[in-house]
Amino acid sequence: MEEKAFQDSYPDDVAWCFGCGHKNPHGHHIRSFWDAPRPPGRGGVGDEEVWTSVCHFQPEMHHTAMPGFVYGGLIASLIDCHSTGTAAAAAYRSRGRELGSEPALRFVTASLHVDYLRPTPLGPVLEVRGRVEEVKGRKVVVNSELLADGVVCAKGRVVAVELPDGMK
Amino acid sequence: MEEKAFQDSYPDDVAWCFGCGHKNPHGHHIRSFWDAPRPPGRGGVGDEEVWTSVCHFQPEMHHTAMPGFVYGGLIASLIDCHSTGTAAAAAYRSRGRELGSEPALRFVTASLHVDYLRPTPLGPVLEVRGRVEEVKGRKVVVNSELLADGVVCAKGRVVAVELPDGMK
């Protein structure tokens, strides 16, 4: 049985995001999961436990920047949607609730920062690794790294906030 | 005769970007132009002259985040490619060279920051307004605002650097 991604738990009415909504037929269908736990003491929520998440994505050949390298907008999108998915999962976890239980927790991006450290080769499956820095009220901060062939090509930081009522 | 966009001047071999390359048949084809000059004294290059640029983009219905609102990854992409285009144009201008003259000046993103101030309605043509903050050596900094129906929905800041030899 295939493991359930964070985004699989989004209710249908808020699952149309081009980046990660399972209902959007044109979208990227980014799927994120909890990663194996890391040793404590390396930062994270309460410095007691580090919550890390991972997603994998295969760019298509037209997702190019310069020939041979991945389009920066796609990299930003992967970091963005992986982080908001991680934020939702972290919010459930911090509240002791099962992922996807009602009422649904859904997060949007307040700010996105990406540092492009080196050109990302177009070809290999990309990996985005997220680390939950903070869960506070309706806000979750996620730091992430994007890797190609095991090399970190970009770093991201997303401040995610729980979906405002006006967007529901 | 249609006005030439910054991106129209990109040589064919570096014009495949999904966001702004005129050669990419699947891409967004973002097109940027110099805007009308602003009064001096409001920041910008040397505080003598403010270089502003503008682009317009019509999202498609599948570029959704939550239903009715524009996907944040697209907003990041518009700000990104508009800024790198503006950076190239600013570099030509600061060097007293004609846009698109050889050897070509082409910029990539070192860092991208986007603040999502409010949900961006999906429907109206979006406007991105860029302002050149700094041109220094191989680096150009561009601040921008993204507007829908005249309302600023997001703000961006891009540090762009001249295309490294390894990406040519």
Image (tube, coloured by chain):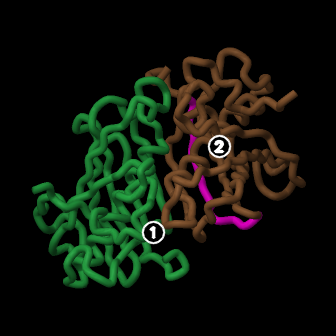
Chain colours: A brown, B green
In the picture, the disc for residue A82 is: 2
Principal SS element in the magenta part?
A: strand
Q: Chain of mark 2?
A: A
Q: Residues within 10 Å of mark 1 (few under 14, many from 20)?
A: many
Q: Which residues are magenta?
A: A150-162
In the picture, the disc for residue A56 is: none
| Residue located at (22% from left, 38% from top) | B150
According to the picture, the residue beneath numbered tag 1 turns out to be B108
Asked whether residue B144 appears in the rendered view, the answer is yes
Quadrant for residue B105, please give it.
bottom left
Quadrant for residue A123, please give it.
bottom right
Residue A12 in percent (x, y) is at 60, 18
Asked whether residue A75 appears in the rendered view, the answer is no
Q: Are marks 2 and 1 on the same chain?
A: no
Q: Secondary structure at mark 2?
A: helix
| Residue located at (44% from left, 51% from top) | B77
Which three-letter amino acid code belongs to the residue tagged 1?
Val
Residue A97 in percent (x, y) is at 78, 23
Quadrant for residue B133, please give it.
bottom left
Task: Name the quarter where the N terminus of chain B is drawn.
Answer: bottom left
Q: Chain of mark 1?
A: B
Residue B35 in percent (x, y) is at 17, 58
